[in-house]
Image (tube, grey):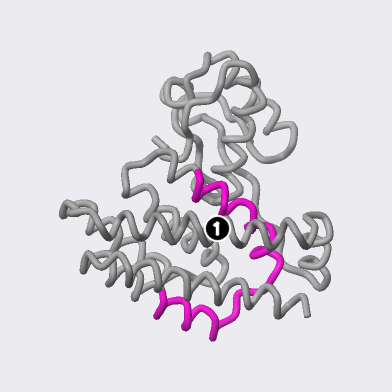
Amino acid sequence: MLPLLRPVRSGNAFEETVERLLQAIKLGVVPHGEKLPPERELAAQLGISRVTLREAIRALQDAAFLDVRRGRYGGAFVVYEPPRPESGDLRRAVAAMGQGDLEDALTFRMAVECGAAEVLASAELTPAQRATLVRRLEDVNEAAPEDYRRLDTAFHLSIAELTGSSLLAAACADARLRVTDLLNAIPVLGPNIEHASVQHAAIVEAILARDPDAARRAVAEHLEGTAALLRGFLA
């Protein structure tokens, strides 16, 4: 089960199903080469019929995001991979988005991710929740450059998911998706990864210490660094 795949509204079931699945694929929640959950589970989680789900999967197969394989070991496998960054990609992405929308997206992300960290740091976590958070931190710290963005996304989304609020998890996923194409358009830089790992550790330390103010400050500092990096490549 994928936490960010919340039920869709009946009026636009097909379109929203495509949107939810694309979100999971583009954020790397289901990475390249892996398959979506079984059809029965996915349809129940999204609150849709299996017919609607099949239509959405077929559309994503036609758009080269999924490969549907039949047989005992079949399923809908993700074939999408983020493109390697090339010169001019970031400017084109921002031009398509609009400078005003970029600043709005960065503000939105700051608000929801800081809020999620504050909420989680205010809660008494179970041993399993604490272990999940630490594991996500270890995963991103040990990530190879080609897998860094996906595991960084998983780390950030886990903070919202661990609050237990599906609405907050969905908001954080939406905020991340709004900047995903921008982040994918800049190279993964060693010094930036090293700096981010220190900031990620500070976020986890504050949450585990149940210090909401410190958690909010740590997330804000980290996201300000990401925003500065984006603006730097646009300068």
| Residue that extends furthest to the bottom in the rendered view of this protein | 191
Quarter of the rendering occupied by the N terminus: top left
Q: Residue at x 61, y 62 (%)?
A: 106
In the displayed structure, 20 sits above or below 92; it is above
Quarter of the rendering occupied by the C terminus: bottom right
Q: Residue at x 68, y 33 (%)?
A: 60
Question: Is 221 displayed left or right of 84 in the figure?
Answer: left
Question: Is 209 displayed left or right of 108 in the figure?
Answer: left
Where is residue 119 drawn, in percent x and y? Answer: 32, 54
Secondary structure mainly formed by the magenta segment: helix
Q: Residue at x 68, y 58 (%)?
A: 181
Question: Which of the two residues, 90 or 139, is positioned nearer the viewer here?
Answer: 90
Q: Does the magenta stretch include residue 197?
A: yes
Q: Does the magenta stretch include residue 148?
A: no
Residue bearing the label numbered 1? 109
- What is the span of residues highlighted in magenta in the rendered image? 171-199
Where is residue 233 drawn, in percent x and y? Answer: 73, 78
In the displayed structure, 160 sits above or below 15; it is below
Q: How crowded is mark 1: few (under 14 residues within 10 Å), some or many (20 or more)?
A: many
